[in-house]
Image: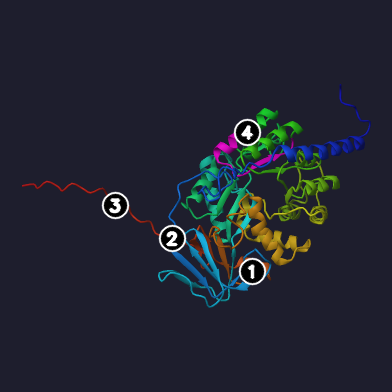
Amino acid sequence: MPAPKFRTSSQARIALVALAFAAATAAQAQTPMNTRDDVLPRTVATTDDPQRIPRRPGPAAGAQTVLTGGRVFDAVSTAAYPATVVLEGRTIKAILPPGRVEWTPDAVVIDVSGKTVMPGLIDMHVHMTYPDPDTPIDEQDTEGDGVLRGARNLRWFLESGFTSVRDLGGVLDAPFQLSRWSAANRLPAPRVFAAGHIITGTGGHATERPITPNHGPAYQWERNGADAWRAAVREAFKQGAGVIKVASHFSPAEIEAAVDEAHTLGLPVTCDCETLYVERAVAAGVDMIEHPLPRSDRAVALMAKMKTASVPTLQVYQNVLDTAGGFYGSTSRRFTMTSQSNFDMFKKLKAAGVTMGVGTDTIGRVNQMIPNPYIAELKWFVKGGYTVPEALIAATRTNARLLAMGDKLGTLEPGKLADLIVVDGRPDESLDDLARIDKVFKDGQMWVSGGQVVVPRHVSAPLAKPSPPEETR
């Protein structure tokens, strides 16, 4: 039986929303996230990413580092308090009240009096390997140049207090190479949870004409049909993805296939989409929607119903509006964007109870501005109704949960990974103090001290035992 034809666009929209709500209930039941918890207990050592690949256990313990004399904002609660933080190896060993001395005699003790110890910042939307405006056009889609740009940008993020970033699109395999090297602590960088290629339909977001190197197959996959979208998710998983990113435009069948496959593989899905595509994506079960892009009140209600999170990235669009006067040239965004409409969307999402994470969408030269865009983003949260401590919790605990890493990151609690920062000030009272990063620890290793990246000196490997030279006469 052929589908009915609607006489007006409003009738079509009403029908679409009704179908979306119906599909939402079905999707919620059909595509649960496969965390493998039933067969892979959390006591098993795994990689520190959503793929949770079993690995050989490391040393049972390690050297201890003690941060004493300061105040702690643990992101478990909104109140800071005086305490001592004890790190052991890669994890947090204990958080002790003042006066208690419970660490090994050989522990490295660091006085952080007058400073605040808190979880490392997490940026949920970055592009570390995208070209800068001054990158030669013939180098914009090369993997090598992308890795070098990314390593430089990641260093800037690390010294700005970030211990994790979610990279939502980059050049070829470069984001995954950086992710692997960072996970192995081979370069000064935050953890990188990479999506790799953006998945969209032919002519979709970031593939528009005129074609440029970063509007081509080195950065985006244009795929058509449900099977092709499912295959793209599998390929991203194979490359090492920690998240799947999709973008307008797509059919209901395509987005449903992508979400089903990603959740089967244990990966969250985020969508750069707008207008009716938001409803399609949420109905299919995506985990997050990026940006403050236009959507109906019905879509916001559907996000709340489905517990779909949002990463609003207000500041990056404010920067575009301030510098370019508007957002132009994208087929996936057929609208006029204003500061007020963006902020109104943020307020609607908050009023509906939608969980919101913090991200900056740093591309190109914006990476040089870090941490300013992130601090500005947090101030948008405060302007929109968050307290300063609540904004910091969004930047740490909430972001870690949206990464599917809440059991290992985002708060200062014994047993969690020792990813934390020391701030010369009280960031839970003044967000501007986040620009005063003193120390950064990732995996229990101090990577930043006095605001500067510190890299241990290379230890020369010994030669194989040489044979003694023959005597000559």
Mark 3 lies on a secondary structure that is: loop
Q: Report the amino acid beneath label 2.
A: Gly
Where is residue 377 drawn, in percent x and y? Answer: 70, 59
Which class describes the residues within 10 Å of circle 2: few (<14), some (14-19), or many (20+)?
Answer: few
Q: Is residue 336 visible?
A: no
Q: CA distance from mark 4 to mark 1?
A: 42 Å
- What is the spatial separation of the Cα atoms under label 1 and label 2, in whole angstroms? 32 Å
Circle 3 residue: 462
Spatial separation of the CA atoms under disc 3 and disc 2: 24 Å
Q: Can you identify the residue that label 4 sits on?
A: 232
Q: Residue furthest top?
A: 1
Q: Amino acid at mark 3?
A: Pro
Question: Which of the two labelled residues, at mark 3 and mark 1, occupies the earlier sequence position?
Answer: 1
Q: Nearer the viewer, mark 3 or mark 2?
A: 2
Q: Secondary structure at mark 4?
A: helix
Q: Which mark's residue is nearer the viewer, 1 or 2?
A: 2
Q: Position of residue 98 (x, y in %)?
A: 55, 76
Q: Are marks 3 and 2 in contact (CB under 8 Å)?
A: no
On the image, numbered disc 2 is attached to which residue?
Answer: 62
Q: Position of residue 152 (x, y in %)?
A: 53, 53
In magenta segment, residue 394: no
Return the mark for residue 310: none
In the image, residue 458 above or below residue 211: below
Secondary structure, mark 1, is helix
Residue that carries the numbered disc 1 in the rendered image: 433
Q: CA distance from mark 2 to mark 4?
A: 41 Å
Label 3 vs 2, first from the N-terminus: 2
Three-letter amino acid code at the position of disc 4: Ala
Q: Which residue is outermost to the right?
A: 7
Q: Where is 166 relative to 137, above or below?
A: below
**What's the amino acid at mark 1?**
Asp
